[in-house]
Image: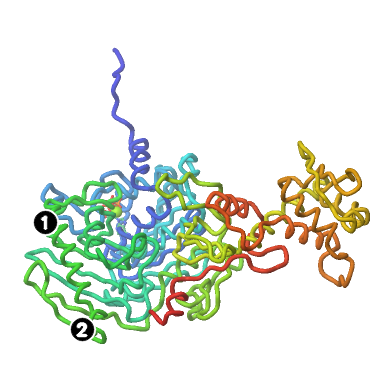
Amino acid sequence: MEKNRIQVLPDEIVNRIAAGEVVERPASVVKELLENSIDAGAQNLSIRLYEAGLSRIAVEDDGCGMSRADAVLALKRHATSKIASHEDLDAIATLGFRGEALPSIASVSRVTVVTRERTAQSGTKLRVEAGVVTGCSDAGAPAGTLVEVEDIFFNTPARRKFMKSAPTELRNIIETVSNLALIHPKISFSVESEGRPLMILPPGQSLSERAEELSGVRPGGLYFAKARHGQRKLTFGFAAPHESRGHRRGIRLFVNRRAVNDRILFKALTEGYRGLLEQGRWPVALLWLDLPSDEVDVNVHPAKREVRFRDEGGLFRWVAGSVAGALSSAPWVRSGASAVEVPDSVEESPFCYEKSAPGSGRAAEALEDYARRALKPGGARSPFYSGGGYGRGGAGRAEPGKLDFSVNSIAEGAEEKSPGETCAMNSPFGELRYLGAFDATFLLFESGDRKLVIVDQHAAHERILYERISAARTGGKGQPLLVPLVVECSAAEIAGFAEREELLEAIGIRAELFGGQSLSLVEVPAGVTGAEGVGMLRDVIGGESFDSGESGGGGRADKLLARAACAGAVKAKMALDRTEVASLMRDLGETKNPSHCPHGRPLVIKMGRAQLYSLFHRK
Ligand SMILES: Nc1ncnc2c1ncn2[C@@H]1O[C@H](COP(=O)(O)OP(=O)(O)OP(=O)(O)O)[C@@H](O)[C@H]1O
Ligand SMILES: [Mg+2]
């Protein structure tokens, strides 16, 4: 008989395909496991991570647990306790409903499930490797379920390669936990990384307490408004516009108790903020929407991050109007008021404001900071245990009244600029927009993080030349000029040349006597132009002796280098055009130490908006 061309795929393959959609990264595993625990009625959730979840994720709950038969079934595709019929699918009340998550996870990792129903005598331990059950036994266990996922993607190396750095994965996990925690404020969450506590959210919190804890605004800085329109309900948590951020992570959207990435809602929210935030700034804003189940479909995305609305236009107008209404009559608008009632600008229903209780932890910012450092040896301790120091005004921020001389990481490679941004340039301090020069000496820029950046052009050029000359020196070579340059000299300079010829060669400058009163410059340090070389030559042969008064710090040649660099560099009071400024900043980006000139003076000052504003006594 002829073999069929079309075959139904075996379960293992189907599960792996599904895993590609459901299980993108460790954070997706954490999300699925936590959702299962929440659906199982758990009140206390513990998450333990090793290597940001890449080597091990353990989620333990005190939920209803499973019988042995159910546990075995749970790992089968489309086995779910959550829906049984068509009608159920239209009104889903649980976070999970497809019976896909566990089998998908189990197909790309090694899973151990230990579970016990509250009334059962003993529990069950189940081991599954790449989707195949490898062990099933009785086990003593507390009521509830522990799911351990080890070596995620061990059998799909291509996917494993797509994992980001551990701090990024950890941050994604924290985001995931935070999103669930913001829908279930009564449930306690604890996250441990490498055995150290990373996040502890106590049980029984109110929504406002939880939201404040996780949004990173100052204590009491989060406000709440509620609106209602027919069966639609909205809760809006927001900080004042001046607490805006340069990124969108302060915005969180929830629909029917699910965190969603929704373009319409995002637009509606930002529309509500129109005129309140400058471009490139994003609010701290949380939006919880409750919609009747016939108005929204949550079953459109494998990870359920997307939803579809029946009446997008109407919803957009209602949300944007509610947000705008809440903001225009927010407590900070009428100073001092902490609780006001204002009419809904769209519908007749009133908002009611609540202010979050002050004093809870500044978790969000601290966590970000932690995620960056947590995996380093001797890294951060839990912000919840260290009692502050990570939050606002903590690490990484300039103290008030002090200028911030910090230098960002050196820009990686020049990026293409769009034609509209001719004055944007790359620099070691990030991408800068050139504003102009002050006193033909100080170059003024605006940085991407909205700081005023002031660069001393002479000092910057000195740094560039200094490093080029040092490199040439260690390379031991100058670079011959195609056409030697003739330099007219005084008798004193000629004498100076005779005295310092060797020193000059040590830094890559070679000149020859040319007639009685001139020198011919034949070699300059690599990367230095002829004109710059002339400046250096003159400085070295004409300057006073380097030997005089030299004491400590930096050898003779280094001093000479610094002086030569200084001599070759553009001077203060020398107007540069935009292109020159751009190449100066680009070259500065190639230096090892773009923050100080070779004499140790700072060459850049960054001033935050707050500092500048406070100089004008503005908030
Ligand atoms: N922590 C848990 N406690 C109790 N039962 C659980 C737990 N985790 C899973 N289960 C059971 O296993 C079943 C399968 O879980 P799985 O996550 O694969 O599917 P689901 O949650 O039903 O749907 P989805 O694929 O949308 O998440 C669940 O329906 C539930 O009955
Ligand atoms: Mg599930």
Determine which quarter of the picture holds residue 284: bottom left
Q: Residue at x 27, y 74 (%)?
A: 207
- The residue carrying mark 2 is 339
Q: Which SS class for mark 1?
A: helix
Q: Residue at x 90, y 45 (%)?
A: 513
Comes first in the chain, label 1 or label 2: 1
Q: Is residue 546 toward the left or the right of residue 365 in the image?
A: right
Q: Is residue 508 toward the left or the right of residue 217 in the image?
A: right
Tell me which image quadrant ligand 2 sits in.
Answer: bottom left
Residue closest to the eye, 420 or 346 = 420
Determine which quarter of the picture holds residue 277: bottom left
- The residue carrying mark 1 is 314
Q: Residue at x 40, y 43 (%)?
A: 107
Determine which quarter of the picture holds residue 322: bottom left
Residue closest to the eye, 84 or 165 = 165
Q: Residue furthest bottom?
A: 336
Q: What is the three-letter code of the residue carrying label 2?
A: Ala
In the figure, 348 relative to 528: above or below? below
Q: Residue 23 location, x and y as percent?
A: 37, 48
In the figure, 301 relative to 338: above or below? above
User: Can residue 121 be seen?
Assistant: no
Quadrant location, the C terminus: bottom left
Q: What is the three-letter code of the residue carrying label 1?
A: Gly
User: Can residue 274 be seen?
Assistant: yes
Q: CA distance from mark 1 to mark 2?
A: 29 Å
Residue closest to the eye, 238 or 400 = 400
Q: Dot 2, how many residues are within 10 Å of its Cα: few (below 14), some (14-19), or many (20+)?
A: some
Q: Which SS class for mark 2?
A: loop
Q: Residue furthest top?
A: 1
Q: Residue 549 location, x and y as percent?
A: 87, 72
Q: Dot 1, how many residues are within 10 Å of its Cα: few (below 14), some (14-19), or many (20+)?
A: few
